[in-house]
Image (cartoon, coloured by chain):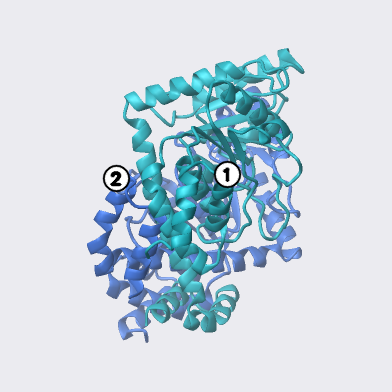
Chain colours: A blue, B cyan
Amino acid sequence: MAIEPDDDALATALLARQRRALAKAITLVESARPDHRLRAQSLLDRLLPHTGNALRIGISGVPGVGKSTFIETFGMYLLEQGLRVAVLAVDPSSPLTGGSILGDKTRMEQLSQQENAYIRPSPARGALGGVGHQSREAMLLCEAAGFDIIIVETVGVGQSETAVAAMCDVFLLLQLPNAGDELQGIKKGILELADLVVYNKTDLDPRAAAIAAGQMRSALHMLRPASPHWQVPVLQASATSGDGIAEIWATLQNYRRLMQQAGAFDERRKQQAQAWMWQLIEAGLQERFRHHPAIQAALPQALRQAADGTVNPATLAALLLDAFQR
Amino acid sequence: MAIEPDDDALATALLARQRRALAKAITLVESARPDHRLRAQSLLDRLLPHTGNALRIGISGVPGVGKSTFIETFGMYLLEQGLRVAVLAVDPSSPLTGGSILGDKTRMEQLSQQENAYIRPSPARGALGGVGHQSREAMLLCEAAGFDIIIVETVGVGQSETAVAAMCDVFLLLQLPNAGDELQGIKKGILELADLVVYNKTDLDPRAAAIAAGQMRSALHMLRPASPHWQVPVLQASATSGDGIAEIWATLQNYRRLMQQAGAFDERRKQQAQAWMWQLIEAGLQERFRHHPAIQAALPQALRQAADGTVNPATLAALLLDAFQR
């Protein structure tokens, strides 16, 4: 579909780094309305040549780890380096539980007032493609609007971390130096996703932080590294005092340089883009399947028969698939 | 499709508990040939009323944990209780790596010679429905052939454990009492699947086993229990001496009784059957998508464009989905 004149003007304004245009464009890609989806696609196609120039940093950690304060301090530091910083949120809260975990409460008060920072709260849920789909497109819009760093944050719940790792160049896991927290982090399988582990709030109890960091290093040594070019470092920081923030940025720059030299940086993005396409295809197939009139008519009985054990699930699946393509 | 006369005779022989009929039927459900799939479906539909009476026990553990010896000892103990025991394997080895991890080497020599035991090695891979599809249908066939206990074994690699947990009434995780093994078990997220954890080979170092079991109990307490009706026990056993085997069987019987009283036993099976149907539908949709002539023609370029970043993956997904249903 060709881009509408209004949306073309929107694209031009966004490329001119106008905040209102960016906000409006993100609202468009977040919309689940079919006509909005078509317009969003045309807009993204128009802007795609101007994307890809930012460093995409995923940040996760359980509630209470101090994520907002960390991103505020880290973001302010990046601004001081002359960089433009956008912060997006991927919220794993389900339609069932309702509210957003990342919330609408006033967060990152200082950062949000800066000219060169842009903070976007969590999108509404329920659109095609599952957790993170809208954030991925919002990320591209921020890149087209000239941001150098995109921080995508999420909490350590559900599949949101996998979604964030699948759209970022580097995944930073924030940890609390509490006894037992190591295990909590490990249990969800997110250590495999982490390119960098940072213990936050280490000023509260430096000794506990050092012990926790040591345990984490041991745990990381037991995992197969995600990349042969990178051994996951474990750093310590205090977002309130600012300690360790410069080292984290230096480490991220080092990561980018090493991965780029190895060709792994671009390779990861290529694989992410293809995986994203497949994810949307899978979601689209299921969407079309579930909304097909023949399926809607036959599905309730099939689910009942599967549960009752009166018909083999494989038989039911075959019948439904045939009804879908008849 | 109506069942063929030959397959009807096969069903009758299987219901009469003839081993050769069971072996032949399993070979049929393991086949990926479309005509075999249709015949297998008719056969399963015919036999379905005679299934569901066994206790389905999933057993997993990393290579070296002594799984074969444990199943041999445990299986012999069950035979002594007058039970008929079938052992199936779900092998996560990929088509890429080739060989089977569970292997064709002589395993469970004693058990395999018993009249009331049936051991089936891993099926060949690559059929519709992903890891475990064939084993699920083989399990139903074993139930129709009058086996009281179906043991489904797998190794702690890939998605095979999730597949096995999704087809069994109870999931038993075998662990080695080694330092650090706790973490290895946890990292793959299988602790959440376990209904029972058993430390094997505890006769080698009883003190290490007691410590490891204690650490495991602590770790389990940090996880949300999979069922409100059951706190996952941590037991110790030696498959070579037979120590602990009787207690494991008593625990499994207790589990079945408690879950049945709570209605959770049947509920789990109902959910598993529906989830299985959905899994086959998803696999079928993808299969049909990938084999569609329009998709085969357009896919290589789409993958290239996604990787190059020249077209937005969402646009490519929408184009391919439209081509599929045109």
Q: Quick check: marks 1 and 2 in contact, CB under 8 Å?
A: no
Q: Relative to A120, say whether B285 is above or below.
A: below
Side of A122 where B187 appears, left or right: right
Residue at horizontal 67%, vertical 45%? A247
- Quadrant position of the C terminus of chain B in the picture: bottom left
Residue B246 is drawn in which quadrant? top right
- Residue B261 or B113: which is nearer the viewer? B113
Side of A93 where B249 appears, left or right: right
Q: Relative to A267, say whether B250 is above or below.
A: above
Q: CA distance from mark 1 to mark 2?
A: 49 Å
Residue at horizontal 73%, vertical 54%? B99
Asked which secondary structure carries label 1, the reply is: helix
Badge 1 crowding class, 10 Å Cα cut-off, few under 14, some 14 to 19, many 20 or more, is some
Residue indicated by mark 2: A96
- Residue B94 or A272: which is nearer the viewer? B94
**Residue B263 appears in the picture as rendered:** yes
Q: Relative to A47, say whether B40 is above or below.
A: above
Residue indicated by mark 1: B19
Residue at horizontal 51%, vertical 73%? B290
Residue at horizontal 39%, vertical 59%? A315
Image coordinates for residue B172, horizontal then vertical, percent: 55, 30
Image coordinates for residue B283, horizontal then vertical, percent: 47, 62
**Residue B166 appears in the picture as rendered:** no
Q: Are marks 1 and 2 on the same chain?
A: no
Q: Relative to B108, say whether A74 is above or below.
A: below
Image coordinates for residue B163, horizontal then vertical, percent: 52, 46
Marker count (numbered): 2
Badge 2 crowding class, 10 Å Cα cut-off, few under 14, some 14 to 19, many 20 or more, is few
- Which chain letter goes with mark 1? B
Amino acid type, callout 2 = Leu
Amino acid type, callout 1 = Arg
